[in-house]
Image (cartoon, grey):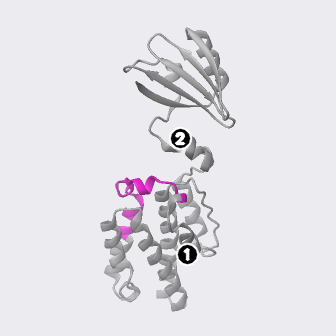
């Protein structure tokens, strides 16, 4: 029996359609939901009505062609974010998803000004780390330029550099370890970054490529919510009050 799941936004419209087109309809009441089972000729459809969201589950013995009224729904068959467990823990994805490019733009506008970045437990570990690394790198490179112009004390640059390197080390659990290690090798020696322009430029180029190249984030850990990252509190403490 094949199973496909769809997230329902326009519940009333879909409910009317199912009642009109199905052969039979039965209601099953449970502690946490109401389930309406609709029978069609080649498949069965269950409309699951929870307090805060609705799902349509389609069952069929073989692949069936679903009409546009069902096909235009958001399919979430293999999307753990829409599992009952995840929704209970984090809420619907729309409540915590964010556009990384917009956050990067916000960081660019803030430059060295204080910027509050708030992370929710449901956000993917990969997205959270990308934003943190982007921001810490931005602060470091801006301070690096000020230090070379003798407009910033070494201690301030050293502090932002230490934060960046620590975040890079922590990201090894989330991203491709070889890529992170390569970047870390250039980044971890502040003396080399200050006195060898070639090393600094290579580090900046590699980190920028790393931030924007999606192939580095296709790991199970990167897709998992930051809630499950075992050093989440340590990560947030690292950046607290500094980005």
Quadrant into which the C terminus falls: bottom right
Q: Foreground: 75 or 134?
A: 75
> How far is mark 1 from mark 2, CA to CA?
32 Å
Quadrant into which the N terminus falls: top left
Task: Determine which quarter of the picture holds residue 171.
Answer: bottom left
In the picture, measured across the screen, residue 131 lies left or right of residue 11, that is left
Q: Foreground: 180 or 209?
A: 180
- Sequence-wise first label, 1 or 2: 2
- Residue at the location (51% across, 55% down)? 225
Q: Foreground: 63 or 218?
A: 63
Residue on which disc 1 sits: 238
Asked if residue 174 shows in the view, the reply is: yes
Asked if the stretch drawn in magenta spans residue 168, the answer is: no
Residue on which disc 2 sits: 83
Q: Position of residue 95 (x, y in %)?
A: 63, 47
Q: Where does the magenta region start and end?
A: 205-227
| Mark closer to the observer (1, 2) | 2
In the picture, measured across the screen, residue 118 lies left or right of residue 44, that is right
């Amino acid at each position: 029996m094949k199973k496909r799941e769809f997230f329902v936004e326009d519940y009333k419209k879909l409910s009317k359609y199912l009642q009109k087109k199905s052969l039979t309809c039965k209601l099953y009441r449970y502690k946490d939901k109401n389930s309406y089972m609709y029978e069609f000729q080649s498949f069965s459809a269950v409309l699951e009505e929870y307090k805060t969201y609705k799902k349509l589950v389609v069952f069929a013995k073989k692949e069936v062609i679903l009409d546009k009224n069902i096909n235009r729904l958001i399919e979430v068959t293999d999307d753990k974010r829409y599992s009952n467990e995840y929704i209970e823990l984090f809420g619907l994805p729309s409540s915590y998803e964010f556009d990384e490019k917009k956050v990067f733009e916000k960081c660019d506008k803030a430059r060295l000004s204080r910027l509050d970045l708030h992370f929710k437990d449901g956000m993917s570990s990969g997205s959270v780390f990308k934003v943190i690394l982007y921001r810490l790198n931005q602060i470091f490179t801006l301070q690096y330029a000020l230090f070379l112009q003798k407009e910033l004390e070494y201690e301030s640059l050293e502090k932002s550099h230490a934060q960046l390197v620590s975040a890079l080390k922590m990201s090894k659990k989330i991203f491709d370890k070889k890529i992170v290690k390569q970047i870390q090798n250039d980044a971890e020696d502040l003396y080399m970054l200050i006195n060898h322009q070639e090393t600094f430029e290579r580090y900046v180029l590699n980190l920028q490529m790393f931030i924007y190249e999606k192939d580095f984030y296709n790991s199970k850990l990167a897709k998992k919510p930051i809630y499950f990252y075992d050093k989440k509190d340590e990560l947030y403490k690292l950046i607290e009050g500094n980005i």
